[in-house]
Image (cartoon, rainbow, N blue to C red):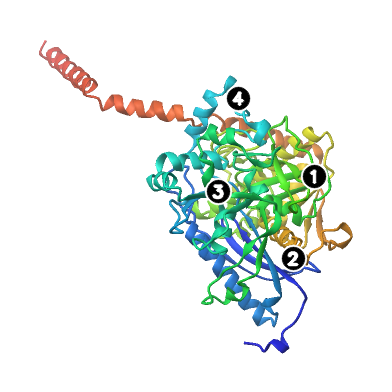
Amino acid sequence: MVASSHRINLGPLVGAIDQGTSSTRFLVFNSKTAELLSHHQVEIKQKFPKEGWVEEDPKEILQSVYECIDRTCEKLTQLNIDVSNIKAVGVTNQRETTVVWDKMTGEPLYNAIVWLDLRTQSTVENLIDKTPGRDKNHLRNKTGLPLSTYFSAVKLRWLLDNVEPVQQAVACHRAMFGTIDSWLIWCLTGGKSDGIHCTDVTNASRTMLFNIHTMAWDEELCKYFGVPMHILPKVRSSSEIYGLLKISSCWKAGALSGVPISGCLGDQSAALVGQMCFQDGSVKNTYGTGCFLLRNTGTRPVMSNNGLLTTVAYKMGRDKPTYYALEGSVAIAGAVVRWLQDNMGIISSSKELETLAGSVGTSYGCYFVPAFSGLYAPYWEPSARGIICGLTQFTNKRHLSFAALEAVCFQTREILDAMNQDSGIPLTQLQVDGGMTTNKLLMQLQADILCISVVKPSMPETTALGAAMAAGAAEGVKVWSLEPEDLSAVTSERFDPQIKLEESEFRYARWKQAVKRSMNWETTQNEDTESRGKSLFSSIPLGFYIIGSMLMLVGAKYLAGRL
């Protein structure tokens, strides 16, 4: 251990827990310069117990947070940076992913149901069937959201209907519900020993239980989904002190005990903040497991006419105004890389995908629609499934790799077109961030397909940066100024379009054809028909009928042979 007198004092530091769909990270920033000083990352295992089901272990997620904080503190010490200068910690998280746990034991009552999960499709279809005119936008005026498997309320409804320990805990008033931020904050502030059960406005707005106008849980919405309000977390702003870290001294991170958790934002809102998109009309696109385009619409919620979501962007303090955003959500972006690697064995790393695609520079007419979880914005079509079309004998894994990257760009084009129609002001350049932006071929393809410039910050960790900014700016912490004149200048890399407009439009039109072919592929009605077909063939009367018919046919052939 380095003596404290030799440690570097960089002034106030702020940490950020970035808990995503595929990994957890802890990052530490200099609050005066926004410089990233150190970080650590741990992969998260996803479970697929049935087709369309996606789960994660809440305890593994929590353990990964402890490990990331521990290792980052260790790295800071090796750099002679005093970890006692960390004055606050922020949390940013995969949104919509749903957890229910027992507040007496601290144990999760089921795996976390991940936002991509499709098990609630029949629940959603039943709810739509009961609404006037089968309108999936029935609740949009209150929530800003369509009825979809994507959001937390239907996942929670499934848990209440199908998991006995959840039912018992709710009946005994022992159950707590939350998205990943709630689970982590509760555990990190003491858990069953007086942990703080809360969430922020951005995460609450993704549940379909939250009224984005009154900024509170809505009794009518809770009744609609059959959710008891006593299991819901308290809703707080995105920037205030929620509680103090309580970490066992057996961890190196125990040195952070007593540090306030004072920032909380859903990952896409955090990226909006990290990209400094504080002005009405500013836009960012994040390329992670999915792809998420957000446009700041100021202090009034704007309802989309083109399949986009209306969501809470941020609320930077208890007494600060709420800002809203229009959002285009794409389910599968970086997840297609993982599918090509883990499921198909076509690549061994994301870098190999860029190399393979770059070696041909074309999909050779091959189009890939990765609708593994249906289609999100602007279609909201759960019946869609992934397809690859335009294959020939000449097509190989290089062309398929290129088509996979193009698919991410085409999906972004669709939601950007919808956003331009809603706003009436076409975007002239796109600010981007997220893990996939390290792929320069993807960024160039995006510029070519959008026909506008794409701008990538040199420091790509904007999601974690946004959480750190919210934490550092909180009342009672105040080590990070969000005043425009105090925000650090961001250096960036620019990608300009390099193909003709006609070629871009031709490729996009072909993509749209492929999307049409992916729709209406899977419905619960189809599953019911298939199961009915199976039950018919297993029924006793039909069995007698088939056997009798076969005997008559054999007998007829026998008699014909005798005559």
Local secondary structure at mark 2: loop
Task: List x then y, in percent, for residue 62.
Answer: 52, 62
In this rendering, the label closer to the viewer, 2 or 1: 2
Q: Is residue 363 visible?
A: no
Q: Earlier in the sequence, mark 3 or mark 1?
A: 3
> Which quadrant would the C terminus be assigned to in this image?
top left
Q: Earlier in the sequence, mark 4 or mark 3?
A: 3
What is the C-alpha distance between the residues marked 2 and 1? 49 Å
Task: List x then y, in percent, for residue 86.
Answer: 69, 72
Mark 4 and mark 1 in contact (Cβ < 8 Å)?
no
Name the mark on residue 477. 2
Task: List x then y, in percent, for residue 421.
Answer: 78, 32
Which of the pair 477/526 is nearer the observer?
477
Dividing the picture into quadrants, the one containing residue 491 is: bottom right
Which amino acid type is marked by label 4? Answer: Asp
Kindly identify which residue carries mark 1: 499
In this rendering, the label closer to the viewer, 1 or 4: 4
In this rendering, the label closer to the viewer, 2 or 3: 2
Kindly identify which residue carries mark 4: 135
Q: Earlier in the sequence, mark 2 or mark 1?
A: 2
Local secondary structure at mark 1: loop
What is the C-alpha distance between the residues marked 4 and 3? 25 Å
Crowding at label 1, few (<14), some or many (≥20) Cα neighbours within 10 Å?
A: few
Task: List x then y, in percent, for residue 265.
Answer: 67, 53
Crowding at label 4, few (<14), some or many (≥20) Cα neighbours within 10 Å?
A: some
Dividing the picture into quadrants, the one containing residue 511 is: top right
Local secondary structure at mark 3: loop
Q: Is residue 510 above or below residue 5?
A: above
